[in-house]
Amino acid sequence: MQKYSESLRLQGKKIAFVPTMGYLHEGHLSLMRKGRSRGDCLAISIYVNPTQFGPGEDLDKYPRDFEGDEKLAEELGCDVIFYPTNQEMYPENYHTYVNVEKITENLCGLSRPEHFRGVATVCAKLFNIVKPHAAIFGKKDFQQLAVIKRMVKDLNMDLEIIGMPTVREPDGLAMSSRNSYLKGDERESALSLSRSLKRAEEMYENGERNAGRIIKEVRRCINDHSHTRIDYVKICDTETMEDSEYLDSESVLALAVWVGSPRLIDNHVFGEHLNI
């Protein structure tokens, strides 16, 4: 992979990169289309990264379908799929990890304390292997996008990080590989995430700026549905990921909710004016 990328760079060609954990859906494909428009070569990775899963999480049962992924990637015009093994990524006596501090200490970082260390580490490794000029991520994983942008800036990595809007199902549910875990009427309960975000947006547009009141209403909307168990509902500054009490600057309302067995995330940005 490194030799191939270096040969392209020596020819003056641009490489666009979309890192994924596979089981591709329209959300991934939208990132790939953006990559296709931004580079001469579109590379994707398919790797279920073990270091970002905590004990008892769904590493072993995370959905996988490489043949289906390969077909979708080829149809879209992807040039390269980088599909490494765990042994290649984390060989024996591997001891090096990347820790991004501060912005990883809230939201998902509270309930998944090792998660962002794994995310930052695998992304740093993938960037060094694939050598892209630009990497494309979805804004659904808002905190992850902020962490990657911070790592790239702090470590002077020579690539552009592009954030793309969340892609949703027709009923509003944010696309996720974990949606496949939903059973029976859990799907209806899962819609409480996007519906509560819409309710929060309505409150904001009607002049509400008190974070506590918005959070209270969002929690009520979610708890009114069966099968839901809230991990967190928070409003944070988009730059620092610290809790906001009052929405006087760009802020993100971030949710993590168990709906049956899957833990689903979603978000909405208030006062958005920055290209995060």
Image: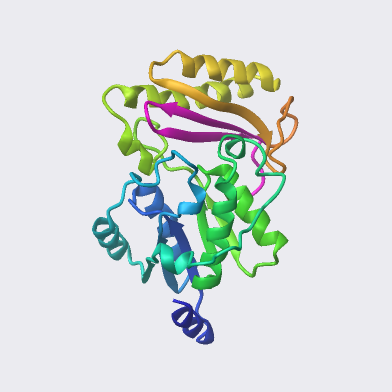
Judging depth in this view, the residue of 89 and 145 nearest the camera is: 89
Q: Viewed as shown, does residue 160 lie left or right of 33? A: right
Q: Is residue 276 visible?
A: no
Q: Check if residue 263 falls in the magenta segment.
A: yes
Query: On the rendered image, what quadrant is the N terminus found in?
Result: bottom left
Judging depth in this view, the residue of 262 and 91 nearest the camera is: 91
Tell me if residue 103 comes above or below residue 254 in the rendering. below
Judging depth in this view, the residue of 145 and 121 nearest the camera is: 121
Question: Quadrant of residue 204 in the image?
Answer: top right
Judging depth in this view, the residue of 66 and 92 nearest the camera is: 92
Tell me if residue 5 comes above or below residue 259 in the rendering. below
Q: Residue at x 52, y 14 (%)?
A: 220
Q: Is residue 68 visible?
A: yes
Pinpoint residue 13: horizontal percent, then vertical percent.
50, 79
Question: Quadrant of residue 191 in the image?
Answer: top left
Pinpoint residue 247: horizontal percent, then vertical percent.
71, 28
Q: Residue at x 59, y 55 (%)?
A: 120
Tell me if residue 270 comes above or below residue 225 in the rendering. below
Give the farthest residue toward the front. Answer: 93
Q: How many marks?
A: 0
Q: Check if residue 86 falls in the magenta segment.
A: no
Q: Viewed as shown, does residue 7 lie left or right of 158? A: left
Q: Residue at x 61, y 59 (%)?
A: 97
Q: Which residues are magenta?
A: 251-276
Question: Mostly what secondary structure, the magenta segment?
Answer: strand
Tell me if residue 66 comes above or below residue 40 in the rendering. above
Q: Residue at x 65, y 61 (%)?
A: 152
Pinpoint residue 195: horizontal percent, then vertical percent.
46, 24
Pinpoint residue 18: horizontal percent, then vertical percent.
46, 60
Q: How is the image coloured?
A: rainbow
